């Protein structure tokens, strides 16, 4: 077990949805820690949301004994990562920086290679050299993978023991590549590393390209929302607080370093699913969302939802079902996400009303 108090954390993607919420939770719960956050604040979606998250972090920092240092930079810039590691010498690294989105990877593949492949390589190399000259170095590298690596697997729920060799989007391919790269570095340089396959993360101040946020924007503007696969998709929606709790528990328990019979490291490497373990039908999800948007006062009670729904075919890169088998997470960390879809969407709807001053 790793004691998190008084540690130095490097969190990439610090202004992102998961990264910012992770940092907020660390600042709230741990004393005398130092969190270094890096983010390039790209314009894949509204930058004001990222700035809003950073403001939240800085406001909370003032009320705690913890310290937060933000660095605006891109993890694909190797020299930047090298300097950060040299200056701060982080104990725990959480790599959440990545170009997200399945459909966007079809439109703009270059950025996925730059951020998800080159950027992660730079982080791995910096972790490797953190042990130079007998230094203690990084105690645990935790990084974001994705449920997208399961591709069109027909076996459900998805288990980390399943073969994931046939990605159906470049985004998924980059995430699978991250797992392979981390395994190689764990074997070669004995870097304790854990990959987390996240399942459809949602909540307040989330990503506007995600369905719940995008649907809300469109409904508010009187536009139609497109429900793919004619409403026959299921998603394992996982609330942000559950994701963050899972990450923090995993951070505290790095895979054990061991030496094999050949005198070389047995890779200290692990993969876990973090999902709600309860897939929701997309039509039911839309029904709950519209109820909560009305209850929060985002939309009027007499809003004609049926007139604003459009059932359309499946999109390239999408899958009909995502469903997380979290038995390993439960067994090793005694953790099971507990936030219901209704409660999670209620929190989002109330935040949305306040943030956009509706």
Image (cartoon, helix red, strand yellow):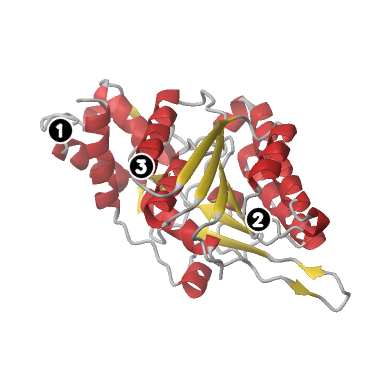
Q: Can you see residue 55?
A: yes
Q: Specify which label sits upstream in the sequence, 3 or 1.
A: 3
Residue 297 shows which numbered tag?
1
Q: Does residue 33 sit above or below 221 in this rendering?
A: below
Between residue 171 and residue 206, name the one nearer to us: 206
Instruction: Give neighbour class at mark 2: few <14, some 14-19, many 20+ (Cα, 10 Å).
Output: some
Residue 242: image x %, image y %? Answer: 39, 56
> Callout 3: few (<14), some (14-19), or many (20+) C-alpha neighbours within 10 Å?
some
Is 12 on the left-hand or right-hand side of 258?
left
Of 316 and 56, nearer the camera is 56
40 in relation to 28, above or below = above
Residue 239, given in percent of the width and then of the height, sits at 37, 51
Residue located 76% across and 52% down the image = 128
- The answer to whether residue 151 of the structure is visible from this angle is no
- Mark 2: secondary structure: loop
The N terminus: image quadrant? bottom right
Mark whose residue sits in front, 2 or 1: 1
Nearer the camera: disc 3 or disc 1: 3
Q: CA distance from mark 2 to mark 3?
A: 40 Å
Q: Which residue sits at x=62%, y=44%?
A: 172
Q: Which residue is mark 2?
A: 164
Is the Cβ of the residue at disc 2 closer than 8 Å to that at disc 3? no
* Direction from residue 328 to residue 64 in the image, left or right: left
* Label disc, if present, on residue 60 of the rendered structure: 3
């Amino acid at each position: 077990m790793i004691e998190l108090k008084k540690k130095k954390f490097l969190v990439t993607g610090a202004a992102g949805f998961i990264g910012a919420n992770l940092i907020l939770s660390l600042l709230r719960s741990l004393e005398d820690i130092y969190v270094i956050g890096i983010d390039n604040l790209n314009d894949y979606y509204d930058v004001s949301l990222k700035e809003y998250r950073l403001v939240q972090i800085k406001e909370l920092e003032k009320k705690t004994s913890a310290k937060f240092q933000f660095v605006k930079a891109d993890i694909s810039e190797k020299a930047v990562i090298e300097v950060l590691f040299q200056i701060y010498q982080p104990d725990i690294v959480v790599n959440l920086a990545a170009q997200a989105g399945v459909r966007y990877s079809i439109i703009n593949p270059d950025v996925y290679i730059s951020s998800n492949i080159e950027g992660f390589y730079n982080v791995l190399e910096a972790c490797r050299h953190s042990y130079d000259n007998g230094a203690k170095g990084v105690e645990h590298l935790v990084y974001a993978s994705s449920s997208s690596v399961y591709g069109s697997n027909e076996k459900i729920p998805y288990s980390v023991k399943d073969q994931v060799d046939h990605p159906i989007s470049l985004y998924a391919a980059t995430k699978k590549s991250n797992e392979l790269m981390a395994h190689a570095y764990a074997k070669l340089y004995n870097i304790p590393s854990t990959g987390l396959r996240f399942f459809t993360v949602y909540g307040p101040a989330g990503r506007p390209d995600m369905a719940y946020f995008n649907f809300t924007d469109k409904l508010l503007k009187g536009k139609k929302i497109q429900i793919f696969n004619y409403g026959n998709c299921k998603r394992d929606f996982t609330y942000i607080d559950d994701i963050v709790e899972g990450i923090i528990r995993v951070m505290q328990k790095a895979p054990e370093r061991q030496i094999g019979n050949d005198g070389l490291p047995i890779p200290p490497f692990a993969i876990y699913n973090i999902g709600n373990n309860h897939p929701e039908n997309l039509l039911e999800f839309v029904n709950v969302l519209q109820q909560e948007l009305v209850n929060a006062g985002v939309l009027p009670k007499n809003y004609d939802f049926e007139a604003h729904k459009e059932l359309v075919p499946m999109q390239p890169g999408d899958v009909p079902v995502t469903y997380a088998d979290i038995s390993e997470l439960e067994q090793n960390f005694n953790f099971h996400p507990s936030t219901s879809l209704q409660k999670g969407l209620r929190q989002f709807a109330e935040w949305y009303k306040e943030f956009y001053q509706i």
